[in-house]
């Protein structure tokens, strides 16, 4: 049986772009009678406050989405990530790195290719320090932990985005200098611990997937099925953002827009219903078919909302 998850980063009220992803993740799992879990990705440091966590939960409920069991909070699982990072380091699969972002940029060979989070790391600290303490003692700086990548690519089959070349742009950070986990590590440790078998998310995260597959491999874990759906874009073809107006659910709600109008708009933006539809999320379950979604970016604002 399929086990999926909703994994919001609580950085304010959900906007139509993330609402669309969560609606699809919910539909995909619930239309098959599967289990859906909620994980709050609140490890982004001081920006995350208790009220933003409550806001994310309220927004999901307002959309008519539900989940099984209690929400899992990443901020309560920090020691698990630290343990796994340390083990990878002890096995020689990860290593301490004291380079600053600037140093990484300067050392990257020209013309430098960029990964999704900065330039490709040139491997400066590989094999330099025995452990975090040694790195600290040698440089007086706190060290991050980087995962060693000895392949160029991890091709994979995405259930929606199809065959992916899975290029991996160099050694990547799994533990930040402040000791907190990097997204790549936390997401793998949690999806595995929660028994997640399907990860449905927006395709801006496609470059992360090969890294996560390498972590699954290193940890001897079975990876989930990945389903990357196109981003919601505004009329200008760019990713839905502030310049397209305030599309946060809180603001829409404040302007008197109903749940039925928002869910109907999302359904229309995904090609599941005609424009102007008003409906509840559960009304989309009966004929939901992931493969019917359009392949290109979802044009959000053609349908009018509000
Ligand atoms: N928390 C991430 C987000 O809200 C999702 C991460 C994931 O699905 O792997 O964008």
Image (spheres, rainbow, N blue to C red):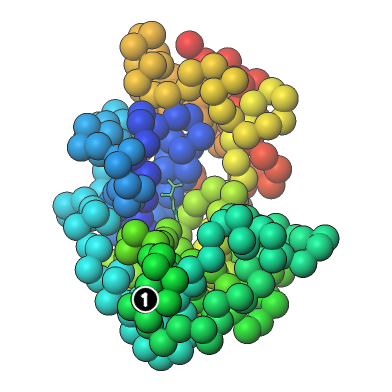
Residues 291 and 123: in front is 123
Q: Is mark 1 within 8 Å of ligand 1?
A: no
Judging depth in this view, the residue of 225 and 193 nearest the camera is 193
State the image quarter where residue 183 is shown: bottom left
Q: Is residue 200 left or right of residue 250?
A: right
Q: Residue at x 62, y 62 (%)?
A: 104
**Considering only vertical position in the picture, is 164 above or below 230?**
below
Q: Quadrant of the N terminus?
A: bottom left
Label 1 sits on residue: 137
Which residue occupies the foreground of this view, 90 or 109?
A: 109
Q: Residue at x 49, y 72 (%)?
A: 97
Where does the image place residue 126, in percent across and percent down from the top left?
A: 56, 81
Q: Nearer the viewer, residue 138 or 173?
A: 138
Report helix, strand or loop for mark 1. Answer: helix
**Residue 268 percent coordinates (x, y):** 56, 29
Residue 54's image quarter?
top left
* Residue 136 in view here: yes
Looking at the rendering, which quadrant does residue 304 occupy? top right
Question: Residue at the bottom extreme?
Answer: 91
């Amino acid at each position: 049986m399929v086990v999926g998850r909703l994994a919001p980063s609580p950085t304010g009220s959900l906007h139509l772009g993330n609402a669309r992803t969560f609606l699809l993740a919910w539909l995909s799992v619930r239309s098959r009678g599967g289990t859906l879990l909620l994980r709050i990705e609140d490890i982004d440091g001081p920006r995350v406050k208790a009220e933003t966590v409550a806001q994310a939960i309220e927004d999901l409920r307002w959309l008519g989405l539900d989940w099984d069991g209690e929400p899992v909070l990443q901020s309560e699982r920090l020691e698990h990530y630290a343990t796994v990072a340390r083990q990878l380091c002890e096995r020689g699969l990860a290593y301490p790195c004291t380079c600053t972002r600037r140093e990484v940029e300067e050392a990257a060979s020209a013309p430098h290719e960029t990964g999704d989070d900065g330039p490709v790391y040139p491997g400066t600290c590989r094999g330099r320090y025995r452990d975090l303490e040694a790195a600290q003692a040698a440089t007086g700086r706190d060290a991050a932990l980087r995962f060693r990548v000895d392949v160029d690519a991890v091709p994979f089959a995405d259930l929606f985005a199809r065959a992916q070349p899975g290029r991996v742009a160099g050694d990547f950070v799994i533990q930040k200098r402040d000791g907190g986990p990097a997204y790549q590590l936390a997401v793998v440790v949690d999806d595995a611990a929660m028994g997640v078998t399907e990860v449905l998310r927006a395709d801006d995260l496609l470059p992360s997937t090969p890294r996560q597959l390498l972590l699954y491999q290193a940890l001897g874990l079975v990876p989930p099925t990945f389903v990357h759906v196109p981003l919601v874009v505004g009329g200008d073809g760019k990713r839905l953002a502030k310049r397209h107006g305030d599309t946060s659910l809180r603001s829409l709600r404040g302007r008197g827009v109903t749940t039925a109008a928002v869910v109907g708009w999302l359904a229309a933006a995904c090609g599941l219903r005609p424009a102007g539809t008003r409906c509840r999320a559960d009304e989309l379950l009966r004929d939901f078919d992931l493969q019917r979604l359009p392949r290109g970016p979802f044009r959000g604002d053609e349908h009018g909302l509000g």
